[in-house]
Image (tube, coloured by chain):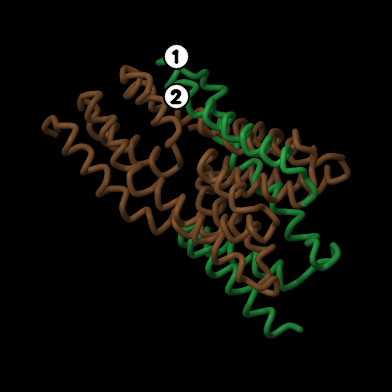
Amino acid sequence: MPASSPRTAYLRGLRTALPFVIVVGPFGLLFGVVGTEAGLNIAQVMGFTVLVIAGASQFTALQLMSDNAPTLIVIASALAVNLRMAMYSASLAPHLGAAPVWQRALIAYMNVDQTYALAHADYEAAPDQTVAAKVAFFFGTATPIIPVWVIATWVGIVVGEAVPPALGLDFAVPITFIALIAPALRTLAHVAAALTSVVMAVALSFLPWNLWLLAAGLAAMIVGAEVERRMGARG
Amino acid sequence: MNYSNGDLWLIILALGLGTFLIRFSFLGFLGNRVLAPRLLRHLRYTAVGILPAMVTPLILWPEVTGGALDPVRITAAALALSVGLWTRNAIWAIVVGMGGLWGLGLIVP
């Protein structure tokens, strides 16, 4: 692949990311609706969306807050859902580590599932691009995705105020989680982790302060990692 | 929901800052350090390890029914899971799951 200028890299990133607006928009919308229904005001819902930009952890926090879990448990559980992003950060570091720190900070802020996946795939396909081109590509992918996420949430807030409770939106949160999990069940290790998670959630449901959630998550991570290790060892 | 305005903002700011630090970690100050394969293996299963635990009680003991098993919700959840596994598409899973909830809600009193 010929070396591309930052400008063409930016536009390529933009084009690659455009279709994913269809995925990001509905999630933002849903968070706006459900957050409003749960009793957050506009500033609080937008605060989540702008400062956190991580749908799954935002829905986790929202669900625990609906159960009136202790503040620390809400924060710890929602952050635990985001731990996978340390892995994203580590896998982008060899490509972007030489960029100026303000660019790396901006990239970190906008490093969501979609921008990460697109950028990582592009860097793997064309590892010889300049750092500037790689940074530009990342900003290109973020250009449609981040604003659509924010605007969709805001639309969700406006719409949410008009949604009657009879629509069963309380169930939108578990359905959203299932929708996020199902496509991720790619390997036996992922399935084993998910099943452990379900079984432990039921078995440990007596634990106070929603601690069963962190305990089940930890057990599931250990099982997933162990199954992966054994499968790898065999193959 | 029973939190003061201050508590809510504490949650939002802590979650925002914590998430940023997780994302900035290697990109920002750990550089090209290679993650121990063992740690990497565990990180891969964080989302798929926590989210199912989160979902299970919401489906089995929903608050709206006072904690009683609800065949409509269990069926809707099963529909969402099947479609998600089959299409590998989160949006379709949501559409079919919520569609199932509303559709079955009309049939089952």
Disc 2: which residue:
A90
Q: Colour of chain B?
A: green
Q: What secondary structure is found at the residue carrying circle 1? A: loop
Is disc 2 in the same subunit as disc 1? no
Q: Colour of chain A?
A: brown
- Give how far across and how far down residue A157 sits, in percent: 56, 59
Residue A102 position in % (x across, y down): 37, 23
Chain of the residue displaying label 1: B
Residue A153: x percent and y percent? Answer: 51, 55
User: Pointer 2: residues within 10 angstroms few (<14), some, or many (20+)?
Assistant: many
Q: Residue at x 46, y 50 (%)?
A: A150
Taking A9 as reference, is A128 above or below it?
above
Q: Which mark is residue A35?
A: none
Kind of residue at badge 1: Arg
- The residue under the point 49% across, 19% down is B35
Q: Residue at x 16, y 39 (%)?
A: A8
Q: Quadrant of the N terminus of chain A?
A: top left
Kindly indicate whether the residue at mark 1 contacts the one at mark 2 (C-beta within 8 angstroms).
yes
Kindly identify the amino acid type of the residue bearing the numbered disc 2: Ala
Outermost residue on the left side: it is A2
Q: Is residue B57 left or right of residue A179?
A: right
Protein chain holding label 2: A
Q: Residue A22 sits in which quadrant?
A: bottom left
Indicate the position of residue B4 as horizontal and vertical percent values: 77, 43
In the rendered view, tell whether residue A102 sits above or below residue B14. Answer: above
Judging by the rendered image, the residue that carries numbered circle 1 is: B33
Q: Is residue A131 left or right of residue A154?
A: left
Question: Mark 1, residues whose alpha carbon is within 10 Å: few (<14), some, or many (≥20)?
Answer: few
Residue A165, image quadrant: bottom right
Where disc 2 sits, the SS reads helix
Q: CA distance from mark 2 to mark 1?
A: 8 Å
